[in-house]
């Protein structure tokens, strides 16, 4: 069984920084892709950042230059480093991971989400 767990959300002031963590637990061979999404009240879910297994990263235009997605392979963890935060970054942030195991092949797993609130 595989689980994806986010942590690190909270309240931060305009212009501040926050780091979210997304860790994969359980029995698997490799993590192919890790992604961060966010969903603000009344808005559609938005793909914020992607990290592929080869290290390629992509970012939404709204966060380019402010967010990065470093990864710690030894800990099966990806982070979302958020800088220069704005009130419009307020949302529930979710991690999604594509994980491969010999019994089930590649599957997508969602974390439970973590709230980020940026005050003006």
Image: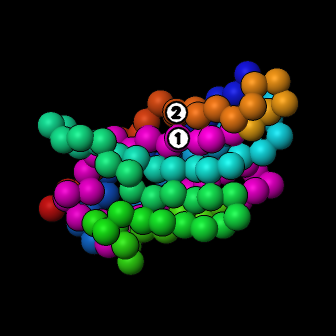
Give the residue displayed 36% in from the left and 63% down from the top: 60
Quarter occupied by residue 30: top right
Residue 108 among those drawn in magenta: no
Which element is circle 1 on? strand
Mark 1 crowd level (few <14, some 14–19, many ≥20, 10 Å Cα): many
Give the residue displayed 52% in from the left and 34% down from the top: 111
Q: Quadrant of the C terminus?
A: bottom left
Which element is circle 2 on? strand
**Mark 2–mark 1 contact, CB under 8 Å?**
yes
Quarter occupied by residue 100: top right
Residue topped by disc 2: 110
Quarter occupied by residue 104: top right
Q: Residue 31: x, y in percent?
A: 71, 46
Q: Which residues are magenta?
A: 72-99
| Foreground pick, 78 / 56 | 56
Q: Is residue 119 above or below residue 24?
A: below
For residue 24, side relative to residue 35 (left or right): right
**Does residue 18 appear in this view?**
yes
Mark 2 crowd level (few <14, some 14–19, many ≥20, 10 Å Cα): some
Q: Residue 73: x, y in percent?
A: 75, 56
Q: Residue 78: x, y in percent?
A: 61, 54
For residue 1, side relative to residue 8 (left or right): right
Residue topped by disc 1: 96
């Amino acid at each position: 069984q595989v689980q994806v767990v986010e942590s690190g959300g909270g309240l931060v002031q305009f212009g501040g920084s926050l780091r979210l963590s997304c860790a994969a637990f359980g029995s698997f061979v490799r993590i192919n892709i890790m992604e961060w999404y966010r969903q603000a009240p009344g808005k559609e879910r938005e793909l914020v950042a992607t990290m592929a297994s080869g290290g390629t990263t992509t970012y939404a235009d709204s966060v380019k230059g402010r967010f990065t997605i470093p990864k710690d392979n030894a800990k099966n963890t990806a982070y979302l480093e958020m800088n220069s935060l704005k009130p419009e970054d307020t949302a529930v942030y979710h991690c999604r991971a594509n994980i491969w195991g010999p019994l089930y092949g590649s599957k997508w797993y969602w974390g439970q989400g973590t709230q980020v609130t940026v005050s003006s």
